[in-house]
Amino acid sequence: MDIAAATPVEELAPTLQRLRHAWQKRRPDYAQRRDDLQRLRKAFHARLDDMAAAVSADFGHRSMHESLLADGMTVLAELDHMLANLRRWMKPQRRGVGWRLWPARAQVRHVPLGVVGVIGPWNYPVNISLVPLATAIAAGNHVYLKPSEYNPRTNQFLRELLAEVFPDDRVAVALGGADVAAAFAALPFDHIMFTGSTAVGRKIMAAAAPNLTPVTLELGGKSPAVIGMDAPMETTAARLTTGKLFNGGQTCIAPDYVLVPESRRDELVQALRREVASRYPDLENGADYTTIINEGNYRRLRGYLDDARARGAEVVPLAEIRDAEKAEARRLLPPTLVLQPGDDAKVMQEEIFGPILPIRTYRRFDEVIDYINAHDRPLALYHFGHDRDEIERLLGSTVAGGVCLNETLLQYACSNLPFGGVGASGMGQYHGHDGFITFSKAMPVLRQSRWTLSDRLKPPYSGFPARMIRLLLR
């Protein structure tokens, strides 16, 4: 079997029809949803090493431990959270009706939508395929998955895993490039979730618009990390390094640039240098540093550095490369700082998605707030420091998809927190209960009693009906 073979475009619509027909014939109840999630967890847990090997092969090299954490642990944790809470999430919620509608009763039932289309990214190809898929299953839907064409071996792993767990009229997988993705997004799904770039997100939304298909867009952008005057620099540098270099920087919520007090810039640079040296003493031969996914992205990142140099910014590699030719052949890009780039530099205009970290300085904290608010709302916002007034000023003056204080990335791993962007960084949210809500319809139900005064509110509006209307207007 050709693992990179694309699904013929003409097969997409019939597959969606098969999924929808099966859903209409038998909508998943609690028992089926729970059984599906349990079988998915068991099958996935048994294949964790196979998963890590497939992802690494697609990247050229990816840290096995980072795959187990980001694409393994996160999926298992979300499945456990769903299994522990699914019955409660499905229970109808009572709502008050107010004295004007008494003695009626009201409730909200979260009912499945039907068939959900999930378009996954290449950077965390298992996590960001299986978590939304499982969440949609928990909400009672059937799912059609379209993973990224950049991960053919991982896609084969996903296809085999899902075929083992689900019948083909409950979960299906489509493979292919931009043409398949465009046709996929134009199908009349009941909901589409897309994770990827802002530019492609606009295309997905436009393709879904003729069908009025609701979309959840998890995009990216430039996520700032703000360092306060009182931040402990060694700890700050360590956590920044994790956020920036995990998965080789190919993370949508990675810190995309740093704003640091002018007087502490050199202190930060030296702390980052020490942290990188301690983690990657032999970057070229170590097993824990992830390479860039493909040649196109590698060239894009090298172009950012060339552009920064040409514009006069200082480019500071944090690790030595002894064999540049071999490193280039492997798409191994060392952790690199860009000091004081201007707004015209590409590293300050475009999402980086690699191990490059621009650092800019500020003198007054107002400059930080003004700079963040002058740009698109970020997917993530980080702050390091313990000045409560400063933190509250930042939280009260900016809008971001999510905020993490004195840490990076871990806001994504908290199942009880919604994950999603705002504006150019996305719309909608998922994870845990918030994902269950996203892939459901909150269907209101009002139940009237046998006898009610509303039966008397009808023409002619005189006498008792008129007095009742006046009472309702109080």
Image: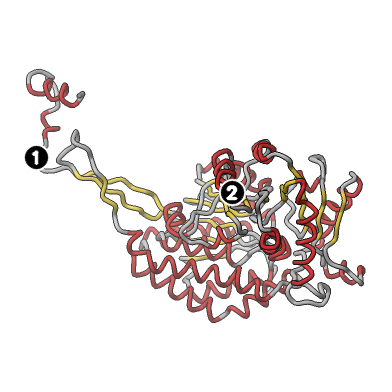
Q: Earlier in the sequence, mark 2 or mark 1?
A: 2
Across and down, in percent, residue 246 comes to 69, 65
Across and down, in percent, residue 421 comes to 57, 48
Across and down, in percent, residue 232 comes to 66, 58
Q: How many angstroms separate mark 2 from mark 1 (CA)?
A: 61 Å
Q: Amino acid at mark 2?
A: Asp
Element under disc 1:
loop
Question: Within 10 Å of the Cα at label 1, are there few (<14), some (14-19), or many (20+) other Cα atoms?
Answer: few
Front residue of 237 and 377: 237
Question: Within 10 Å of the Cα at label 2, are there few (<14), some (14-19), or many (20+) other Cα atoms?
Answer: few
Residue corresponding to mark 1:
451
> As drawn, is 473 to the left or to the right of 364?
left
> As drawn, is 55 to the left or to the right of 394?
right
Front residue of 453 and 370: 370
Q: Farthest residue to the top: give it.
A: 462
Position of the N terminus by quadrant: bottom right
Residue corresponding to mark 2:
387
Foreground mark, 2 or 1, reads 2
Q: Amino acid at mark 1?
A: Trp
Front residue of 7 and 62: 62
383 w.r.t. 398: above or below: below
Q: Residue at x 55, y 58 (%)?
A: 411
Q: Residue at x 57, y 63 (%)?
A: 129
Q: Is residue 226 visible?
A: no
